[in-house]
């Protein structure tokens, strides 16, 4: 179900999506050309293959202020480079367990296989991930305060990233 | 002026210091880490004087990372804004004589070709209360570098543990004296007391006795001695020695930011790192680990003395204790010294 | 056992089967032990074996200064040999280029000079007390099992804690990190010529010792060790601020075992898990 974003929320999560260009990016494009309305909270970064997604990107995204990260690629068997998503699958499994072990809400790191024909699925995935991250709340504890202008006078706070001493699992603003 | 302070009154004195709008730093037993570290305390009960901290106290005056200025890119210029170090009135209690001496020795390099305002602002706001050592460790060698377990170099106040459990309190600076007068009622007169007998007892317990203070020319002559390579073969270039050392002061200046602006930072660095002397063109004069090891020992015992008249090493032994492979500046240098004598 | 080690060392040096013996020797401070590199037969008497022979000497097989001394023979406990197997399977070392002198181990103690018998955390519950894959083994082979609360129990206890408590724990741990990189330097498997933490164009990990940068560094290193870490726990031992890297790396190793049925250092011919795949790998977490 893809619903238009007509409800006003207090907190609009910022979600970074790392997607493969052959399947998911094309699928997202299809969602667009089909005029499917879905949550606008996701910023998409196109990569050649899900295997290119280094876990550094995920960490950087959180550091730079992402409240959630979505990773999406081709279905197993459909990878443009034959086996990229198989390697990626193993990597993501281990990393997601590590993130969970550190106490970071697993709702903040999500994965999907979206094919080039699955425009509707893309919209559903984005809506669902957005709601999950919205419920998890802003991810303040990790990110660097990314806005230089407001924090030039408070560099110490900037550097320690201590906007608030909140657990990331606390919901709300 | 000398005073005597009882054990209970020591605790009360620290409480009064805390009440005087002062940040109090003392050795604590970190429950999570199962070891002694210097940390800020809110209650005097947490201060522990029965252990030796793994890391030195230098991070409270020379922080691990320090912003120097921020910069913002504007249309055709860069706006730079200096950062004023946020400094609070601070007292560090429970330093060992080697730690206090470390600050005095390190002061010289920060007052060399310019006065490092970041260092000095913190340094001036900090008062050092040193606790003398009655039980040196078998890794200690302060006496080898001209110090002792109850030396007062660098201390604003020195507490020497006396045999009856009380402390002889001596203050050497205005900063130190003002701390004593803050709680004058807690101190008994002590002009008749002397630390030389407890000091001698502690010195007698020191296991390491070689003199490392006059090795300048010996080290210079032995720069190319092959012994360095054999003796420091175990070194893995980890950096723990420099980070825990009370006098290591090398730092790395980095700019971190994005397309809008950034901050210039001063971070701790270590000469044991393989890229420490790597040039922009790719050449690295200290491309092998033994060269980096040798340089560290030379800096401590020769170069700094040549420049500033004092050994940079204060014989605290932290590098020895923290080294994952038990590499030991005292052993390596005395081995070179003895090979030379052969 | 010391005499056996010295005898083997002498034979290897005499017959030129080895150019350098990497083993353990005493230091100036009573009871303490350090790695030594013996190239002369007369120095083989410096080799010792006791409860403080902690170091994973496999690390030195990558060190150019040691390699230049000649063909290495190295004194190894069962846990250390796992690192060699790991390095061989990653093509960092040829198995035939090193002689492994295996020593059955009854566990190492925590105290540097052996004044207390409390075992090192990594020794508790050890499954490799009898060294496998050794070229020559010394001593009688019946070491006593080492009792205590094992690391696996701690990992399980932590995984059972609520998420926010875990976060608080790791936040406090990483706040202590001083970015000395001792963990990286002592690790036999951190063999990148140019570490990602040292790259500045672009910079992936800030070099400042701030909370987010410390997280990035420790998480990245732990993740890079997935499928590599042999559980020698040198990183945790070397850390000057006692960060519980052993828990972190062990958790990942257990995940790798559960997900891909792979354990570093057991099978010389096993491919590292993240360099391969199975068609039916777990993907329940993927929508």
Image (cartoon, helix red, strand yellow):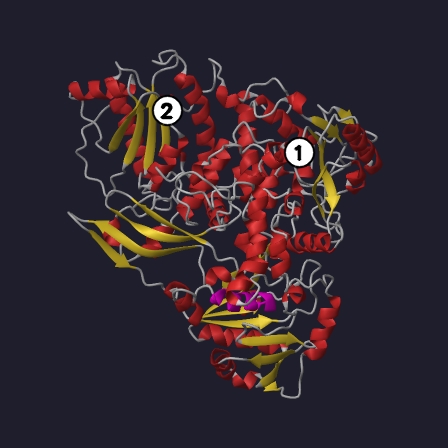
Label 2: which secondary element:
helix
Q: Quadrant of the N terminus of chain C?
A: top right
Q: Is residue B59 visible?
A: yes
Q: Nearer the viewer, residue B135 or A104?
A: B135
Q: Is residue B245 visible?
A: no
Q: What stretch of residues is rendered in magenta?
A: B95-108
Q: Is residue B104 magenta?
A: yes
Of all residues shown, which one is farthest toward the front?
B221
Horizontal arrangement in the rendering, residue B156 relative to residue C84 (left or right) = left
Q: Residue at x 83, y 33 (%)?
A: C7
Work out whether B89 lies above or below B181: above
Horizontal arrangement in the rendering, residue C29 relative to residue A113 (left or right) = right
Is the residue marked by circle 2 packed among few (<14), some (14-19), or many (20+) residues within 10 Å? some
Q: Nearer the viewer, mark 1 or mark 2?
A: 1
Q: Which mark is residue A52?
A: 2
Q: Nearer the viewer, residue B11 or B24?
A: B24
The chain to which mark 1 is attached is: C
Label 1: which secondary element:
loop
Query: Toward which corner of the image does residue B6 lie, by quadrant?
Result: bottom right
Work out whether B63 lies above or below B168: above
Q: Position of residue B264 (x, y in %)?
A: 33, 52
> Marks 1 and 2, Cα distance to the nearest angstrom?
40 Å
């Amino acid at each position: 179900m893809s619903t238009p974003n007509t409800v006003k929320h207090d907190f609009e999560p910022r979600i970074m999506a790392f997607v493969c260009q052959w399947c998911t990016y094309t699928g997202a494009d299809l969602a667009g050309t089909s005029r499917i309305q879905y949550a606008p909270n996701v910023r998409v970064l196109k990569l050649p293959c899900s295997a290119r997604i280094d876990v550094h990107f995920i960490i950087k995204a959180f550091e730079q202020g992402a409240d959630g990260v979505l990773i999406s690629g081709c279905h197993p068997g459909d990878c443009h480079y034959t086996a990229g998503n198989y390697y990626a699958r193993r990597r993501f499994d281990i990393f997601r367990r590590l993130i969970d072990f550190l106490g970071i809400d697993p709702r903040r790191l999500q994965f999907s296989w979206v094919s080039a024909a699955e425009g509707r699925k893309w919209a559903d995935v984005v809506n669902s991930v957005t709601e999950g991250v919205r419920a998890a709340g802003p991810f303040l504890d990790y990110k660097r305060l990314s806005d230089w202008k407001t924090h030039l006078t408070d560099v110490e706070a900037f550097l320690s990233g201590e906007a608030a001493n909140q657990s990331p699992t606390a919901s709300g603003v | 002026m000398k005073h005597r302070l009882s054990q209970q009154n020591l605790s009360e004195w620290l409480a009064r210091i805390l009440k005087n709008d002062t940040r109090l730093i003392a050795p604590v037993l970190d429950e999570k880490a199962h070891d002694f570290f210097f940390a800020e305390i809110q209650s005097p009960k947490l201060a522990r004087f029965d252990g030796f901290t793994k890391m030195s106290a230098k991070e409270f005056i020379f922080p691990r990372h320090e912003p120097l200025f921020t910069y913002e890119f504007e249309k055709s210029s860069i706006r730079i804004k200096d950062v004023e170090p946020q400094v609070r009135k601070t007292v560090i209690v429970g330093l060992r004589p080697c730690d206090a001496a470390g600050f005095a020795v390190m002061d010289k390099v920060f007052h060399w070709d310019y006065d490092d305002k970041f260092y000095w602002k913190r340094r001036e706001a900090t008062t050092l209360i040193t606790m003398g050592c009655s039980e040196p460790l078998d890794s200690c060698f302060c006496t080898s570098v001209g110090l002792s377990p109850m030396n007062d170099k660098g201390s604003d106040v020195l507490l020497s543990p006396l045999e009856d459990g009380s402390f002889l309190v001596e203050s050497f600076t205005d900063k130190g004296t003002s701390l004593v007068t803050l709680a004058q009622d807690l101190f008994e007169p002590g002009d008749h007391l002397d630390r030389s007998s407890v000091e001698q007892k502690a010195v007698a317990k020191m296991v390491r006795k070689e003199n490392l203070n006059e090795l300048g020319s010996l080290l210079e002559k032995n720069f190319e001695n092959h012994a360095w390579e054999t003796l420091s073969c175990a070194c893995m270039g980890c950096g723990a020695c420099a980070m825990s050392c009370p006098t290591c002061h090398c730092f790395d200046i980095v700019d971190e930011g994005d397309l809008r602006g950034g901050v210039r930072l001063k971070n701790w660095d270590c000469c044991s790192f393989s890229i420490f002397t790597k040039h922009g063109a790719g050449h690295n004069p200290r491309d092998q680990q033994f060269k980096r090891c040798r340089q560290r020992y030379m800096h401590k015992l020769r170069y700094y003395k040549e420049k500033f008249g004092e050994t940079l090493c204060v014989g605290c032994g932290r590098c020895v204790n923290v080294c994952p492979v038990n590499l030991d500046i005292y052993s390596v240098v005395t081995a070179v010294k003895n090979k030379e004598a052969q | 056992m010391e005499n056996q080690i010295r005898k083997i060392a002498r034979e290897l040096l005499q017959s030129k089967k080895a150019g350098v013996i990497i083993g353990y020797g005493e230091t100036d401070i009573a009871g303490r032990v350090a790695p030594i590199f013996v190239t002369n037969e007369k120095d083989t008497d410096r080799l010792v074996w006791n409860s403080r022979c902690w170091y994973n000497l496999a690390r030195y097989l990558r060190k150019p200064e040691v390699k230049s001394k000649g063909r290495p023979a190295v004194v190894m406990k069962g846990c250390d040999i796992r690192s060699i197997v790991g390095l061989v399977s990653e093509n960092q070392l040829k198995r035939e280029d090193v002689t492994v002198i295996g020593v059955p181990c009854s566990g190492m103690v925590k105290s540097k000079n052996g004044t207390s018998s409390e075992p090192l955390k990594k020794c508790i519950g050890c499954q490799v007390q009898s060294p496998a894959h050794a070229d020559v083994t010394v001593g009688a082979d019946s070491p006593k099992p080492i009792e205590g609360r094992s690391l696996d129990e701690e990992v399980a206890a932590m995984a059972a804690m609520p998420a926010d408590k875990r976060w608080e724990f790791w936040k406090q741990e990483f706040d202590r990190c001083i970015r000395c990189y001792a963990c990286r330097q002592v690790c036999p498997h951190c063999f990148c010529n140019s570490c990602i933490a040292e790259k500045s164009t672009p910079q992936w990990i800030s070099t400042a010792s701030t909370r987010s940068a410390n997280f990035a560094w420790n998480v990245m290193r732990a993740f890079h060790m997935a499928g590599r870490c042999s559980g020698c726990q040198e990183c945790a031992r070397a850390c000057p601020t006692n960060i519980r890297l052993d828990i972190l790396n062990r958790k990942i190793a257990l995940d790798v075992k559960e997900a891909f049925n792979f354990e570093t250092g057991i099978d010389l011919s096993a491919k590292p898990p993240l360099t391969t795949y199975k068609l039916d790998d777990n993907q329940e977490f993927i929508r």
